[in-house]
Amino acid sequence: MTGPRNGQILFALGLALANTVYGWQVLQMSRPFVAGEPGPAFLPALLCLALYGLLARVLISEFRTRRAEASGEAADTGLLPVLGQLFAIGATALFVIGFVWLGYVISAALYSFAIAFFFNVEDSGRWGRSVLVALPVAAGVTGFGWLFFDRLFGLTLPVWGF
C-alpha cells in the first residue's frame, strides 16, 4: 500500500460517509415531484446519487491501480496526482470569485474546462486529447447548468459584472 493510494481510498470513504449523512437529511425533505414540480429535495438527491456513482468509480479505479502496481505494470506518475487536489481547490475558489465578477457562463465554462482538462491530462498524459475532451465537457456542463437553473427553476444567474 502506497501513501497516496491509501489516502485516496480513505478520502473516498470519508466522502461516502459525509454523503450518507447528507443523503439522510435529504430523505427528511418532501419528495421531489409530489406537487408536479422538482421541489427543494430534487437537486440534493440528484447530487447524492451522482456522488455515490463517482465515489464507486474512484474506488474501483484505485483498486485496479493497486492490482496493476502489484503486478509491476504501474508507471511513476510524479507529482501530477498530488497536485490535483490542490488544483481543484484553487480552481473552485477562483470559480466562486469569478461567478460574481464574470457571471455564470464565463466562470462556469472556464472552471469546468480547467477541471476537465487537468484531470484528463492527469489520466492520459496527452495535452491535445485533453483539450478536445475538455471543450465539450465545459460546454455541456455550462449549458446544462444554465438550462437547469435559469429555465427549469427560473433563477436568474449573474452576468458580466464590470
Image: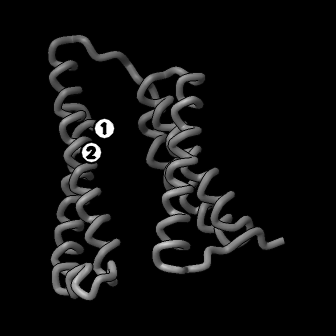
Quadrant including the N terminus: top left
Residue 117 location (% of width, % of height): 54, 37
In the image: residue 81, left or right of residue 101: left
State left or right for residue 76 relative to residue 101: left
Q: Are marks 1 and 2 in contact (CB under 8 Å)?
A: yes
Q: As rendered, which of 91 and 54 lies closer to the eye?
A: 54
Residue in the foreground of this view, choosing between 81 and 154: 154
Q: How is the image coloured?
A: one colour
Neighbourhood count class around disc 2 (C-alpha, 10 Å): few under 14, some 14–19, many 20 upward: few
Residue 14 position, x and y percent, is 22, 59
Tell me which residue sits at (44%, 23%) in the image.
124
Q: How many marks?
A: 2
* Disc 1 target residue: 4
Q: For this rendering, which residue is in front, 125 or 39?
A: 39
The amino acid pointed to by label 2 is Gly
Q: Secondary structure at mark 1?
A: helix
Say which element carries label 2: helix
Q: Which mark is residue 7?
A: 2
Mark 1 vs mark 2, CA separation in Å: 5 Å
The reply, left or right, for residue 43 in relation to residue 88 is: left
Direction from residue 49 to residue 146 in the image, left or right = right
* Residue ID at (17%, 64%): 17
**Is the C terminus in the top left, top right, bottom left or bottom right quadrant?**
bottom right
